[in-house]
Image (cartoon, rainbow, N blue to C red):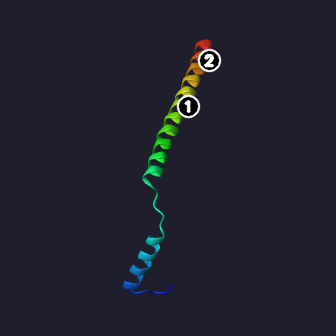
Amino acid sequence: MAITNPFQFLQQVRAEVAKVVWPTRREVMLTTVMVFILAALTAIFFAIVDILIRGGLQTVLNFFG
């Protein structure tokens, strides 16, 4: 591994940062909204699964208890 001096390192860092493509405000808003929508759908899905499992378990326990 080659050792570079701090000045060269900073130049390389600036060159790499210049290559970064930053998202637009619209892209950030769309992805944020999509994350919230998918999180809500996931929460609803697991709530339904939880209700079904609880109901099934209560049915089995009432049958044997």
Give the labeled residue for mark 2.
60
Query: Eyeballing the image, is 17 above or below 38?
Result: below
Picture disc at residue 17: none
Secondary element under disc 1, as helix, strand or loop, is helix
Q: In the depicted view, which residue is nearer to us: 15 or 8?
A: 15
The foreground one among 29 and 13 is 29
Q: Is residue 6 above or below residue 35?
A: below
The answer to whether mark 2 and mark 1 are in CB contact below 8 A is no
Q: Is residue 55 above or below residue 50?
A: above
Determine the secondary structure under disc 2.
helix
Q: Crowding near pointer 2: few (<14 within 10 Å), some, many (20+)?
A: few
Q: CA distance from mark 2 to mark 1?
A: 23 Å
Taking 10 as reference, is 57 left or right? right
- Percent x, y for residue 18? 44, 71
Which quadrant would residue 6 be assigned to in this image?
A: bottom left
- The C terminus lies in which quarter of the figure? top right
Closer to the camera in the image, 30 or 4: 30
- Residue at point 37% right, 84% down? 7
Work out which residue is located at the far left of the displayed protein and give it: 7
Give coordinates of residue 20: x percent, y percent.
47, 67
Please state which amino acid type lies under the numbered disc 2. Answer: Val
Q: Which mark is residue 45?
A: 1
Q: Residues within 10 Å of mark 1 (few under 14, many from 20)?
A: few
Vertical order, 61 against 5 (above or below): above
Q: What residue is shown at x 52% (from left), y 28% (from top)? A: 47
Looking at the rendered structure, the kind of residue marked 1 is Phe
Which of the two discs, 2 and 1, sits closer to the camera? 1
